[in-house]
Amino acid sequence: MSFGATEGGTLVDIQNVTAYRGSNRVFDALSLQIDEGCHTAILGQNGSGKSTLMKLISKEIYPVANPESHVRVFGRDRWNVGELRCRLGMVSHDLQQSYLSGARGVNVILSGFYGSIDTWQNQAFSPQDVERAEAVMLRLGIEELRHRAFGSLSTGQQRRFLLGRALINNPDALLFDEPTTGLDLKGTCSYLETLRSLMQDGKSVLLVTHHLHEIPPEIQRVVLLREGRVATDGMKKDVLTSRLLSELFDSPLEVAERNGWYQVLPAG
Ligand code: ADP
Ligand code: MG
């Protein structure tokens, strides 16, 4: 099955993967392939395995070792995690929670070079690195906050700094795990604008969300996860239907579409 333009190879190739979080088996023989350039949204109830899937892809967690299974990213099984982070940026609610509140804005961005939380004395940054951090802050409209402590920023500002941290390496692909959680409507809209401009710049995007109205028109494919299994996988217009979403969320729902944007309402 082909899903829209392919600009390169395969971004993610998951074959027959079993994965645990603690003693919970989240995936049992999961298989999923996503091509570079095919912007994809992942939907599912709480606990269906969305964040675990993102962490498998970013190699924050590993599957049960088995010769018949693999998690290949950009065509490779084995990665130096630092090298992978340069090609694959991740923005998640988890990271925001665990980020050090004392870190200064510019250092949050620079920490992306090392995939660290804050910057440390043993890390070196060239004038070009600092220049690049400035350019990223300018693009995201946060340059005036460069000296502020992370903990003193609003949720939306923190989220932008974490996106900047991911963008500092100019990654080919970005993983977003519920990127608009906690943002007000203005913050959500402006975050979505940024997301769209990144897709238009040719970054491949994998987006986990609960909110249909936050799936931009550029997203081509939608995967529905249910209890660690791919329940449905296909082109967005074929997947975002009242029937399939009512089944996924065990609730009667009605889906509406306008200008490439979707909305969901309680049915009846
Ligand atoms: P989602 O992101 O779709 O809400 P997750 O991938 O976070 O789901 O979680 C999948 C399952 O794994 C859930 O049953 C959750 O309770 C469990 N889980 C997640 N994180 C942990 C953890 N650190 N320890 C134990 N179980 C976990
Ligand atoms: Mg999650």
Image (cartoon, rainbow, N blue to C red):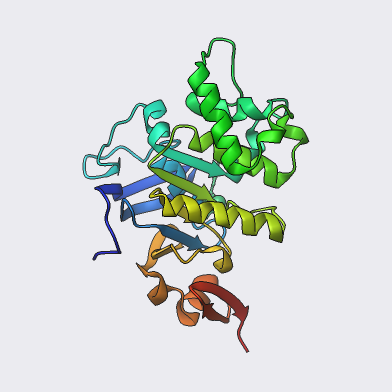
Q: Nearer the viewer, residue 4 or 33?
A: 4
Q: Does 206 appear above or below 84?
A: below
Residue 257 against residue 145 in the figure, above or below: below
- Percent x, y for residue 249? 54, 71
**Residue at position x 41%, y 42% from top?**
56
Q: On the picture, is 144 further left or further right than 111?
A: right
Which of 165/73 is in front? 165
- Residue 32 location in percent, x, y? 32, 55
Q: Residue furthest right?
A: 152
In this rendering, the answer to whether 93 lies above or below 59 is below
Snapshot quadrant of residue 92: top right
Taking the image as drawn, is residue 161 in sight?
Answer: yes
Residue 122, image x and y in percent?
54, 10
- Quadrant where the image shows the N terminus: bottom left
Q: What residue is rendered at 53% in x and 50% in y?
A: 177
Q: Is residue 11 left or right of 155 when viewed as pictured?
A: left
Q: Observer-nearest residue: 27 or 58?
A: 58
Query: For residue 60, what is the image quadrant?
Result: top left
5 w.r.t. 135: above or below: below
What residue is drawn where x is 51% and y is 49%?
Answer: 176
Quarter of the C terminus within the rendering: bottom right
Q: Residue furthest bottom?
A: 268
**At which x and y percent is residue 125?**
52, 16
